[in-house]
Amino acid sequence: MMRIILFLLLSFLAFTLHAQTLQGKVLDREGLKPVPNATLFLSNTMVSTTTRDDGSFFFPNIPSGRYELIISCTGYKTGRIEIISSSLPQNLIIQLEPYIKELNEVVVKNYEKDGWNKWGRIFTEQFIGTTPFSVDVQIENPDAVKFILDKQANTLSAFSNEPLVIINKALGYELYYELELFEFNFRTKLLLFKGFPLFKKMTPRSKSQERRWTNNRKEAYQGSMMHFFRSLYRNQLLENGFEVRSLIEVTNEEKIRVKNVLSSRFKSNNNKELPEPTIRDTFRFSISGDSMSHYQQVMRMPDNSYIIQPQILTGDSIAFGIDSFSVGMFFKNLLQVKFLKKKMPIEVANALSGTNFFPASTFSGYDRVDENSIIFANKMDMISRIKLTSDDGILVLSNGSFFDATRLISYGYWAFWERISTLLPLDYKPPTQ
């Protein structure tokens, strides 16, 4: 009961805190001269300002919470400063580091020539996404994106030295996106991208377009990670349609035993260390038909499986209060998150069906699932998994953001939905019923 009261108290304090002001100057680090016309914005919001001729800036309304203040200007490396509304500095002095032309030219030479023609389609599919809104999203300056292919690691990386200008006609936003990291692994299909977007609302041409944008924004929000973390912060997961259960990892001991048997045969035949055996290696030995069949079957199995627990978890069982606008989140193994209030869009379901996320057959009740699958009766159910990469957990804020984002890996629905085409600003508020 005390934890529930604490959650409610945190929510109340978060909404009653007043917006704060922030002012300061942006200077050139080398000559300490003012930097005019630099853009400053709170990442993933619509809050921004520009420096004056003397390098000074002023934010009249900093919303409550923790944000990354991004400073962007042509000819300078992008600056990033973490700020907290409850402890803003009186006069913030920011020094930007100029780009070194010679060094920049050396780095650019490492990029692939004609990169967009080679990798633009894959980049767009992964970065913009394959959602119902993707067809209405356009990158205005695609030539700014540079690509590096690591053949040994089988990964594609992308970078940009200028903000990407993205027009989202489905949600009615214009984005200026500082792309810091993009990495796609062709083998594992895992995607990692990080950046700092500034949102600007587009002006609707008609009432019908305004209604369409309102409906699409609500559709993008419902069941999203932002919706989930806002619900977690307020300890209202089930009330808002999120059914959360724990997944316990179980190691496939029989596969480990079979691998050891095959490895020992490798060594006896070759007298040297060889790579870990695979399914193909079961054909290399003269063993009985039954044993060969068993070995092949076992080697096709996943290394790990997960048992879904029947208990539904509440927010205060996986999160704890920290201060007036944040809670900590920690859990062991993995969590399965199912959103009950709508079904998965067909575009995302089709994208997921091309992966190993769906089991080979349909199951009922609670059972064991492999490392790339989730049990559910209907593949259109909106089911995701999340896993922490650090024992330190993550920090969740009242606006639905979380830190550090690299400490959380998502699978399933969220892995395909949380892309640029569905991205909403942190200051978005869903319409009331």
Image: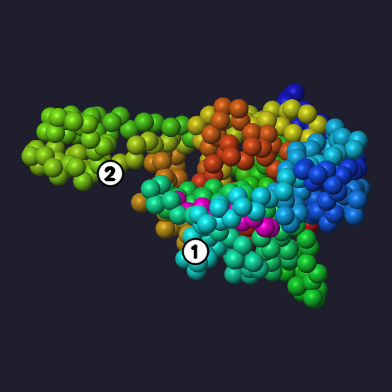
- Residue type at mark 1: give it: Lys
Which badge, 1 or 2, comes first in the chain's sequence?
Answer: 1
Judging by the rendered image, the residue that carries numbered circle 1 is 113
Position of residue 289 in the picture relative to residue 34 (left or right): left
Query: Which quarter of the picture shows residue 276?
Result: top left
The residue drawn where x is 54% and y is 48% is 192
Q: Which residues are magenta?
A: 155-163
Residue 63 makes an appearance in the image: no
Question: Marks 2 and 1: in contact by CB < 8 Å?
Answer: no
Position of residue 248 in the picture relative to residue 427 (left or right): left
Q: Residue furthest top?
A: 2
Look at the image and tell me in which quarter the C terminus lies.
bottom right
Look at the image and tell me in which quarter the N terminus lies.
top right
* Residue 76 x %, y %: 72, 51
Dominant secondary structure (helix, strand or loop) of the stretch shown in magenta: strand
Judging by the rendered image, the residue that carries numbered circle 2 is 300
Q: Is residue 159 magenta?
A: yes
Query: Which quarter of the picture shows residue 231?
Result: top right
- Residue type at mark 2: give it: Arg
* Residue 206 x %, y %: 80, 76
Q: Is residue 11 magenta?
A: no
The residue drawn where x is 78% and y is 29% is 323
The residue drawn where x is 83% and y is 56% is 37
Residue 85 makes an appearance in the image: yes
Nearer to me, 321 or 394? 394
The residue drawn where x is 34% and y is 37% is 303
Q: Is residue 298 above or below residue 35?
A: above
* Residue 125 x %, y %: 52, 62
